[in-house]
C-alpha cells in the first residue's frame, strides 16, 4: 500500500488538514440535513398525520443509523489507528470485515420492518391515519435499509483513510435525488407516504453505489480492499466491535430515549408531535454539520492516538470544538429569530403555529449548546475509549433527559417538555467537559514527549510544522 494516507494524516499542518478533511463532510452533512428536511416538507403536504407518522419513524431510522454508524466508527478508528502505527494490511482487513458486519445489521432491520412495525406504532398512538401511514413508511425504509447501512460503512472506510471528497459527492447525489424524487413520487404519481419512503430509500441506494465505487475503485491506491480482506478474522472483528459496539449502543440509546420523549410529547396530540418533528428535522442543519466536523477530526485523532502525538491530538480537537460551536450557534440563532419561517415551510396549522413559535425559541438554546458537546463526546472513540461516549450518552439521556422531561411536563405541561430538553443539554455539556478533563489526565498526559511515529518513521522534522 502506498503511504499517501499516512503521510497526509501525520504531517499536514493541523488547521489546514482539519479544514480539508472536515469541509467535504460538512457539505455532505448539510446535504443530509437538506435531504431529511425536504422529505418532511413534502410529507407535510400529504397530511399532518403523515408528518406525525414520519416523526414517529425517526427513532427507527436512528436505530438503523446506530447499527451502521457503530460499525463505521469501529472501522474508521481501526483504519486510522493502524495507519498511525504502520500496520497498513490491518487497515484493509478492517474495511473488508466491516462490510461483512453490515449484512448482520441489514438482517436485523428487515426483520423488524416485517414483524415489529405494528407493535412499535401501537406504543404511541391510536390514530388510524398515523398508524396506517407509519406502517407503510417504516416497513419500506427498513426493508430497503441496505442503502443507508452500506452508505455509512463505505463513508467510514473512505474517511478512515483520509478520503473525504467521495463521501461528500455521495451525499450530494443522494440529496439531489431525494429533492427530485419526493415531488415526483408524492405529487405527480400520487403515491403518498409510500412515495416518500421510496424516494428516501432510492436516494440512499444512489449514495451507497457511489460510496462503494469509491471504496473499491477510486480509493484503492490509498487503501486497497482486496478479496483477502473479506476473510473473517476474529482479532480484526474484535477490534472493530470494541470501539463500534459502545458507539452503536450510544446511538441506540438515543433512539430509544427519542422514542420515550416522543411518547411524552404524544400526550399533547398530533400537532405537538408534528412541531417536534419539524424541530428534529430543521435542527439537523446545526447538528449534522458538527458531525461532519467530527468525521474530519476523527481520522486525525485516530492517527495521533496510534502515533501517541499529544500535540496533534489536542490541537485538532481544540479547533474542532470551536468550529462546532460556531455552526450550532448560527442555526440556534435562526430558530430564535425566525421560528415562523420554519413553521411556514412545514405548512403548519394554526394550532401548530401557536405551539411552535414558543417551542422553537426555547429549543434554540439546545441547538446553540449542542456543538461543543457533540465534538467532545465524539473525541473518545478514536482513542479506543468508546465506552466514555456510551457513559456520557447514558448519563445525559437516561439519568437526565427522561426524568427531567417527565418531571417538567408533569408540573408545567407542554412547555415543560421544551425546558426539560434545555436543562438536559446544559447538564450534558457540563458532564462531557468533566469527562474530557479526566481523559486528558488519565490518557493524553501519559503519552511520551515525542510521538511514537517520530521514532519509527522518521517524521520528527514535520512535527513542529504540523502543530
Image: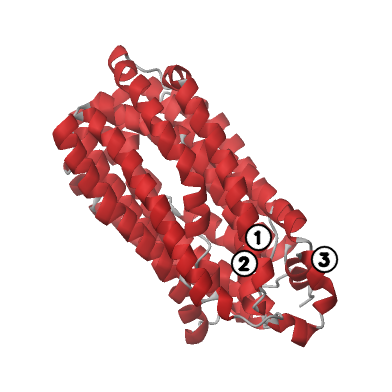
Q: Residues within 10 Å of mark 2 (few under 14, many from 20)?
A: many
Numbered mark located on residue 316 in the image: 1
Of all residues, the one furthest to the top in this rendering is 350
In this rendered view, identify the residue nearer to me: 181 or 454. Answer: 454
Q: Nearer the viewer, mark 2 or mark 3?
A: 3
Q: Residues within 10 Å of mark 3 (few under 14, many from 20)?
A: few
Marks 3/1: CA distance? 14 Å
Q: Position of residue 125 (x, y in %)?
A: 18, 35
Mark 3 lies on a secondary structure that is helix
Relative to 60, 33 lies left or right: right
Numbered mark located on residue 64 in the image: none
Q: Residues within 10 Å of mark 1 (few under 14, many from 20)?
A: many
Numbered mark located on residue 465 in the image: 3
Residue where numbered disc 2 is placed: 301
Q: Is residue 467 visible?
A: yes
Mark 2 lies on a secondary structure that is helix
Q: Position of residue 101 (x, y in %)?
A: 46, 70
Above or below, comparing residue 300 to residue 405 in the picture: below
Q: Earlier in the sequence, mark 1 or mark 2?
A: 2
Marks 2/3: CA distance? 17 Å
Query: How many numbered marks does the figure carry?
Result: 3
Q: Earlier in the sequence, mark 2 or mark 3?
A: 2
Q: Earlier in the sequence, mark 3 or mark 1?
A: 1
Amino acid at each position: 500500500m502506498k503511504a499517501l494516507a499516512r503521510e497526509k494524516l501525520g504531517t499536514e499542518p493541523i488547521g489546514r488538514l482539519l479544514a480539508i478533511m472536515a469541509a467535504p463532510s460538512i457539505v455532505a452533512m448539510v446535504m443530509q440535513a437538506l435531504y431529511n428536511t425536504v422529505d418532511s416538507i413534502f410529507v407535510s403536504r400529504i397530511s399532518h398525520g403523515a408528518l406525525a407518522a414520519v416523526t414517529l419513524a425517526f427513532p427507527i431510522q436512528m436505530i438503523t443509523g446506530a447499527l451502521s454508524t457503530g460499525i463505521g466508527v469501529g472501522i474508521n478508528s481501526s483504519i486510522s489507528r493502524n495507519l498511525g502505527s504502520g500496520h497498513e494490511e490491518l487497515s484493509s482487513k478492517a474495511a473488508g470485515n466491516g462490510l461483512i458486519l453490515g449484512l448482520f445489521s441489514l438482517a436485523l432491520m428487515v426483520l423488524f420492518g416485517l414483524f415489529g412495525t405494528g407493535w412499535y406504532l401501537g406504543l404511541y398512538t391510536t390514530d388510524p391515519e398515523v398508524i396506517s401511514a407509519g406502517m407503510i413508511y417504516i416497513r419500506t425504509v427498513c426493508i430497503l435499509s441496505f442503502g443507508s447501512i452500506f452508505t455509512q460503512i463505505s463513508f467510514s472506510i473512505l474517511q478512515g483513510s483520509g478520503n473525504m471528497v467521495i463521501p461528500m459527492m455521495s451525499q450530494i447525489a443522494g440529496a439531489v435525488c431525494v429533492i427530485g424524487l419526493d415531488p415526483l413520487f408524492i405529487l405527480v404519481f400520487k403515491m403518498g407516504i409510500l412515495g416518500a419512503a421510496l424516494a428516501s430509500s432510492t436516494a440512499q441506494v444512489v449514495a451507497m453505489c457511489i460510496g462503494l465505487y469509491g471504496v473499491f475503485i477510486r480509493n484503492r491506491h490509498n487503501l486497497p480492499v482486496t478479496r483477502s480482506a473479506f476473510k473473517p478474522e476474529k482479532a480484526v472483528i474484535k477490534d472493530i466491535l470494541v470501539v463500534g459496539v459502545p458507539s452503536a449502543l450510544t446511538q441506540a440509546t438515543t433512539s430509544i430515549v427519542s422514542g420515550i420523549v416522543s411518547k411524552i410529547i404524544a400526550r399533547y396530540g398530533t400537532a405537538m408531535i408534528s412541531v417536534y418533528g419539524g424541530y428534529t428535522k430543521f435542527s439537523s442543519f446545526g447538528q449534522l454539520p458538527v458531525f461532519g466536523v467530527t468525521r474530519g477530526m476523527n481520522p486525525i485523532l485516530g492517527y495521533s492516538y496510534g502515533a501517541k502525538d499529544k500535540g496533534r491530538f489536542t490541537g485538532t480537537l481544540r479547533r474542532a470544538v470551536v468550529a462546532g460551536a460556531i455552526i450550532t450557534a448560527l442555526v440556534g440563532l435562526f430558530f430564535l429569530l425566525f421560528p415562523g419561517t420554519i413553521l411556514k415551510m412545514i405548512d403548519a396549522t394554526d394550532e401548530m403555529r401557536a405551539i411552535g413559535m414558543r417551542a422553537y425559541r426555547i429549543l434554540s438554546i439546545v441547538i446553540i449548546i449542542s456543538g461543543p458537546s457533540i465534538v467532545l463526546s465524539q473525541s473518545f472513540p478514536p482513542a479506543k475509549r468508546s465506552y466514555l461516549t456510551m457513559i456520557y450518552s447514558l448519563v445525559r439521556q437516561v439519568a437526565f433527559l427522561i426524568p427531567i422531561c417527565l418531571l417538567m411536563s408533569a408540573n408545567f405541561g407542554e412547555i415543560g417538555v421544551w425546558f426539560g430538553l434545555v436543562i438536559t443539554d446544559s447538564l450534558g455539556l457540563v458532564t462531557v467537559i468533566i469527562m474530557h478533563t479526566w481523559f486528558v489526565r488519565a490518557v493524553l498526559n501519559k503519552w511520551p514527549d515525542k510521538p511514537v511515529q517520530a521514532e519509527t518513521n522518521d517524521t520528527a522534522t514535520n512535527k513542529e510544522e504540523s502543530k
